[in-house]
Image: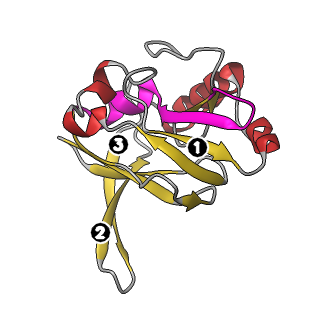
Amino acid sequence: MTDTNVPAELSYTPEHEWVRKVGPTTVRVGITDYAQGQLGDVVFVELPEEGTTVAKGDEVVTIESVKAASDIAAPLDGVITEVNTVIVGNPALVNEDPLEAGWFFRMSMADPSELDALMDEAAYAAWRENMDRIYGKAEVIVAKQRHGATGKVTLKFEPTITRFS
């Protein structure tokens, strides 16, 4: 994996989120350099409310770019303890500094051992390389998904199986 910053002190999800342990039971969450590059210029971020209890996989952040909109899922079970309101007023920070100033939220982990199930830097790098091998230089498409009674439309990124020579 080249052209993206993958610090060793972070943990990673297959959805290209990073998790930084900042205390015994507290983590900070954002998206990887690779993810912000795939999104393009970020123009809007909607963050969860502090005090919200979340389960791993719950959609907690909505992010919109010039290409599409996407929901960011909670990487662990816990409670949102702080949100980065700076990126609401300046969403470009997600592109400019995704690993520091562009973070989304802090959370208190319900079970700190869940952190062990996330990928370390080497595993994330290998996972990304395998995905590139499987899908080639993945072209990102947008899929619309309508949520039941709310009628909310969520746009998700899905790689196509297109190979580039």
Q: Nearer the viewer, residue 85 or 64?
A: 85
**What sort of colour scheme is used for the picture?**
secondary structure
Q: Percent x, y for residue 47?
A: 36, 49
The answer to whether any part of residue 51 appears in the image is yes
Q: Residue at x 55, y 17 (%)?
A: 6
Tag shown at residue 107: 1
Q: Percent x, y for residue 130?
A: 62, 30
On screen, residue 63 above or below 51: above
Q: Nearer the viewer, residue 20 or 139?
A: 20
Image: magenta residue range: 21-41
Of circles 1 and 3, which is in front? Answer: 1
Tag shown at residue 153: 2
- Report which residue position mark 3 lands on: 140
As measured in the structure, the alpha-carbon distance from the residue carrying label 2 to the one carrying label 1 is 26 Å
Task: Work out which quarter of the rendered image holds the N terminus and state it.
Answer: top right
Asked where in the image residue 123 lies, by quadrant, the reply is top right
Nearest to N terminus: mark 2 or mark 3: 3
